[in-house]
Amino acid sequence: MDDFFSLLVEVFDAEGWQYQPIPDRGVIECAFEAHHTMVPLHLQVFPSHQILSVVARSGTRLPHAHRGRGAELLMRTNEELILGAFELRWDHGEVLFRLAQLAQPGPGFNGLVKALVHNAVVEMDRLTPALAMVAKTPPERLPTLDIEALMRREDTVPPVPETAS
C-alpha cells in the first residue's frame, strides 16, 4: 500500500492540492471549490488490485419524501455517463458520485489521477443545481416535477472557458 499511496500523495503535492492523508487506510480526503459548490472527495488506493477509487459527496441531502424523484434524476443522469455513476444512500439521503479505475504506477499515472479527480468534481458540480431543485420542491409538487426538463436546463451550466488556438 505504501508505494501506491505514496504515488497518489506525490500527485497531490505536485498539483498543490490540499488534502488530509490517512496512510494506514490508503485514503486521501480533500475538497475542491467548483462552480456551484464545494465538492468533498474521498480517494482510496487498493494496491493488491491496483485500483484507485474516487468518491465525491454532494452537500445536498434529499429529504425522505424527495428520494424517489432524486433517484430518478440520478438514474437518468447515469444513463448519459461514460465513466462513473451516481448513487443514493437511501437511509441518509446522501448522494455520491463514484468511479474506480485500474491505476498502474508508471507513465500516465499522474494524468490518470488528475483526470479522475477532475471528472468527479465536474460531475458532482454539474448535478448540484438539479439535485437542489428536487430537494427544495414542496412535497405536494413532487409528482408533477419534470425530471427530464430539469436535466435539459442550460441556465445552470457553468460557462466553458475559451481556449487559445
Image: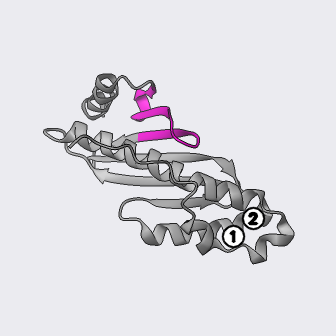
Can residue 68 be seen by looking at this rendering? yes
Magenta residues, dominant SS class: strand
Considering only vertical position in the picture, is 145 above or below 96? Answer: below
Disc 2/disc 1 C-alpha distance (Å): 6 Å
Q: Identify which residue is drawn at 46% across, 72% down.
A: 79
| Residue under numbered circle 1 | 69
Quadrant of residue 93 within the rendered picture: bottom right
> Which residues lie in the magenta part?
19-43
User: Counting other residues with Cα less than 10 Å from the Cα at mark 2, is it few (<14), some (14-19), or many (20 or more)?
Assistant: some
All told, the count of numbered labels is 2
| Residue under numbered circle 2 | 66
Can residue 47 be seen by looking at this rendering? no
Considering only vertical position in the picture, is 126 above or below 161? Answer: below
Q: Quadrant of the N terminus?
A: top left
Q: Nearer the viewer, residue 136 or 28?
A: 136
* Residues at circles 2 and 1 in contact by the CB criterion of under 8 Å: yes
Q: Identify which residue is drawn at 38% across, 43% down.
A: 161
Numbered badge on residue 4 = none
Q: Position of residue 81 (x, y in %)?
A: 41, 65
Q: Position of residue 45 (x, y in %)?
A: 35, 41
Q: Identify which residue is drawn at 29% across, 42% down.
A: 163
Residue farthest to the bottom, as pictured: 144
Q: Secondary structure at mark 2?
A: helix
Q: Position of residue 57 (x, y in %)?
A: 56, 46
